[in-house]
Image (cartoon, rainbow, N blue to C red):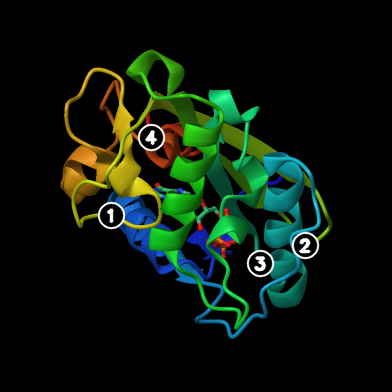
Amino acid sequence: MHPLEGKRFVVASHNEGKLREFADLLAPFGFEAKSAREYGLPEPEETGTTFEENAYIKAFAAAKATGLPAMSDDSGLVVDALDGAPGVYTANWAEKPDGSRDFGMAMQKTEDALQKAGATEPAQRTGRFVAVICLAFPDGEAEYYRGEAEGKLVWPPRGELGFGYDPVFVPDGYDKSFGEMTAEKKHGWKPGDAEALSHRARAFKKFAEARLGSA
Ligand code: ITT
């Protein structure tokens, strides 16, 4: 296992919502973690069919381009009644013909698919957010940390906080959607905390415990 020398790595993401969450999660560790955007890196094409494959594509592209270790996050919403869709295509469901993203449209598409599948009762609307963090090195070595958050899809969307599909996802054990939760509630985690709520915070907890020197 390569060491993380020099306390420097790249956060290989162009998604502002993810980058905000990683900035919060990384704050206690004293690492210099600049984003792919700050390095002016292009967005590689995500041609994989699993979260792990796409996470590797992004992390390795950034590591190769900068010569630094890079961590990426490939994530998405896996809906049981839709046989796992949108899954690795969660971002694609938001894409408009001009290349921009519209998550209102993506959430509506998901709801339309659920209605078509006859999933109208809460028990039929189960799913999970998944995040796979890949830490890759310029020589291609890589490791993976997966986090999942179980919950239910709700309609109409609730709340304006967070990003992406947060307003339609209520994690198990809560009444509020991720879109109604503060940043602290959704993804707050710091060294020593036994639990994390969101998929990203759960993946990050494993990464931090393995790699950032937190107990
Ligand atoms: P990068 O590849 O640059 O990191 P991306 O947005 O293309 O950004 P993904 O390919 O991993 O990222 O797509 C995951 C999509 O899943 C993302 O665009 C969100 O819409 C959604 N998603 C992931 N985590 C989420 C979260 O915590 N809350 C809401 N939506 C989330």
Residue at which label 4 appears? 214
Q: Can residue 151 be seen in this view?
A: yes
- Residue 139 at what x, y percent from top left? 83, 58
Residue drawn 28% across the image and 37% down it: 189
- Residue 215 at what x, y percent from top left? 37, 27
Image quadrant holding the N terminus, namely: top right
The amino acid type of the residue labelled 3 equals Leu
- Residue 208 at what x, y percent from top left? 45, 39
Mark 1 or mark 3: whose residue is earlier in sequence: 3
Residue at which label 3 appears? 68
Residue drawn 29% across the image and 21% down it: 194
Residue drawn 38% across the image and 38% down it: 201
The amino acid type of the residue labelled 2 equals Pro
Whether tag 3 and tag 2 are in contact, CB under 8 A, the answer is: yes
Mark 2 or mark 1: whose residue is earlier in sequence: 2
Q: Is residue 123 above or below residue 167?
A: above
Q: Does the residue labelled 1 lie within 8 Å of ligand 1?
A: yes
Gap in angstroms between the C-alphas marked 1 and 3 = 29 Å
Q: Quadrant of residue 197?
A: top left
Q: In which quarter of the image is residue 151?
A: top left
At numbered mark 2, what does the secondary structure look like: helix, strand or loop? loop
Q: Residue 138's mark?
A: 2
- Residue 106 at what x, y percent from top left? 48, 56
Q: Can residue 148 be seen in this view?
A: no
Q: Residue 162's mark?
A: 1
Q: Nearer the viewer, residue 66 or 122?
A: 122
